[in-house]
Amino acid sequence: MSLDKETVRKIAFLARVDVPDDQLAPLAGELSGILDWIEQLREVDTSAVEPMTSVAEMTLPWRDDAVTDGGYPERVTANAPDSQDGFYLVPKVVE
């Protein structure tokens, strides 16, 4: 698939990218080359290839889906500028 300068100008406008007029022709060539590679990839027969989510066969460890309070409020509020009884103290914003 070959792109012309007007098509590249429209793509740049839609992508909100400012492309100077003198760079439209080289960019059209580069984008056309990328689209040619995509066309070549479409020709590859992948019907016998199983879909995968990772290149390594592994199972991630699971944890119990249980609600907890964390159990360490002093660590959570350690970096707070001001805290009291395990809660953040913030300035009053509504009178």
Image (spheres, rainbow, N blue to C red):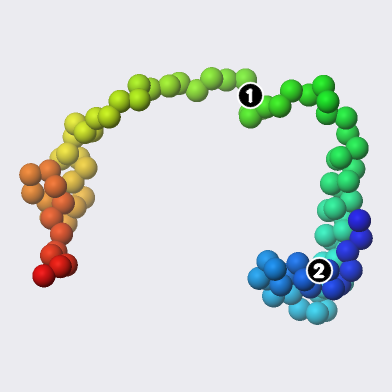
Query: Which image quadrant is residue 67 in?
Result: top left
Label 2 – label 1 distance at C-alpha = 39 Å
Q: Exactly how many numbered labels are in the figure?
A: 2
Query: Which image quadrant is residue 71 in?
Result: top left
Whether residue 75 sits left or right of residue 5 in the image: it is left
Check the image and name the residue furthest to the front. 95
- Count residues near mark 1 (Cα–Cα under 10 Å), then give few for <14, some for 14-19, many for 20+: few
List x then y, in percent, for residue 5. Answer: 86, 72
Residue at 87% in and 58% down: 32
Local secondary structure at mark 2: helix
Q: Is residue 85 visible?
A: yes
Residue at 13% in and 55% down: 89
Local secondary structure at mark 1: loop
Whether residue 50 sits left or right of residue 90 in the image: it is right
Residue at 74% in and 74% down: 19
Q: Is residue 26 visible?
A: no
Residue 8 marker: 2
Q: Quadrant of the C terminus?
A: bottom left
Q: Nearer the viewer, residue 34 or 10?
A: 10
Q: Nearer the viewer, residue 95 or 51?
A: 95
List x then y, in percent, for residue 43. Answer: 91, 37
Amino acid on which the number 1 mark rests in the picture: Ala
Whether residue 30 sits left or right of residue 54 in the image: it is right
Instruction: Give the answer, above or below, for where 58 lies relative to 13.
Output: above
Query: Which image quadrant is residue 29 in?
Result: bottom right
Residue 56 marker: 1
Instruction: Give the answer, above or below, for where 27 lies relative to 66.
Output: below
Check the image and name the residue furthest to the bottom. 21
Instruction: Give the answer, above or below, for where 55 lies relative to 42.
Output: above
Say whether marks 2 and 1 touch (CB < 8 Å).
no
Amino acid on which the number 2 mark rests in the picture: Val
